[in-house]
Amino acid sequence: MLREALEGRAPNRKGWVRANCPWCEDRIGKPDRKQCLGFNAISGRWHCFRCGIGGRTDVDEEQVLLFDEEAIKAERVVMEPPESFMPLYEEPGWSSWEGHVPRAYLRGRGIDDDLGFDAGIGACYEGRAKKRVVVPIFAADQKTWMGWSGRAWFPGARQKYLYPTGMDREALLYKHDALLIESDDPVFVVEGVFDALAFWPDAVAVLGKPSEGQIEALIVAKRPVVVALDGDAWREGDALALRLRFEGQRAGALRLPPGKDPDEMVDWVRAEGRKSL
Ligand SMILES: [Zn+2]
């Protein structure tokens, strides 16, 4: 199906090919006419920012030969777990002594062992993501890494959050599959992965501010959408909910107090979320 969808399309310099996603109709009930599927002929990674399906295929010679080899070398981005990544809630990380500090940090942020396991959270002790807990961002197959978010567990880090080079934040949603569950219970739209973890499994994170591609995915969600951005972004939240309603989605927005994030007031957000619809 992937091959047919991509037939006859020319990739750009970075190896990306866009096409209408052949899975959208099955997954969200509406065909894709906006070329939401991206396939990277260099890495073999592919992903639809509308229905969230994605994974990785083997790239054959023929595909690679379509490109200028120099360009390929320059742009080659392989999205893998960061160097020294160790899962914290399964072996060998589970019983390693180094795991105590990051697990304690996570517990302090309300992430218990079951949630940590379900979300595949790990930690790094060396390399670029050293001393960070790493939350993987998976494709729909729940195993292909599309990216990750690394949070420093020590105070005073110059960059609290770290993302991998080459990760297309605007084309990804953390926990995209939450949009595909048919339900009257709302899904919450939050900014960061830790906010989404606090509402697990009922939230997606936009990893910053909502992008056009992400909004496309929210429009076709199979459940009502409650926008719960950080307290200082309530205007953007209101505008987003308005836009979603205009597009026919059931949507509401919450105004959190200034300086507050949704993971600091989970019960309030859950209760008010329903009322906002
Ligand atoms: Zn799709």
Image: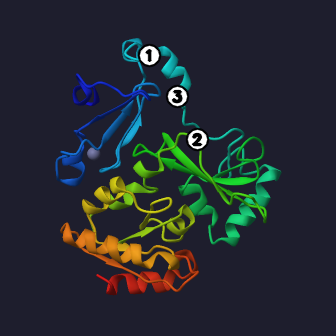
Give the side of residue 157 with respect to residue 8, left or right: right
Residue at 55%, 24% in the rendered image:
74
User: Helix, strand or loop at disc 1?
Assistant: loop
Which residue matches tag 1?
68
Which residue matches tag 3?
75
Q: CA distance from mark 2 to mark 1?
A: 22 Å
- Which one is in front, 133 or 259? 259
Q: Position of residue 108 (x, y in %)?
A: 70, 72
Residue at 20%, 46% in the rendered image:
32
Q: Please identify the quadrant where the C terminus is shown.
A: bottom left
Badge 3: how crowded within 10 Å, few (<14), some, or many (20+)? some
Q: Position of residue 169 (x, y in %)?
A: 48, 50
Q: Is residue 132 above or below residue 43?
A: below
Q: CA distance from mark 2 to mark 3?
A: 11 Å
Q: Number of labelled discs?
A: 3
**Mark 2 or 1, nearer chain start:** 1
Q: Please identify the quadrant where the N terminus is shown.
A: top left
The reply to whether dot 2 and dot 3 touch (C-beta < 8 Å) is no
User: Helix, strand or loop at disc 3?
Assistant: helix
Q: Is residue 37 visible?
A: yes
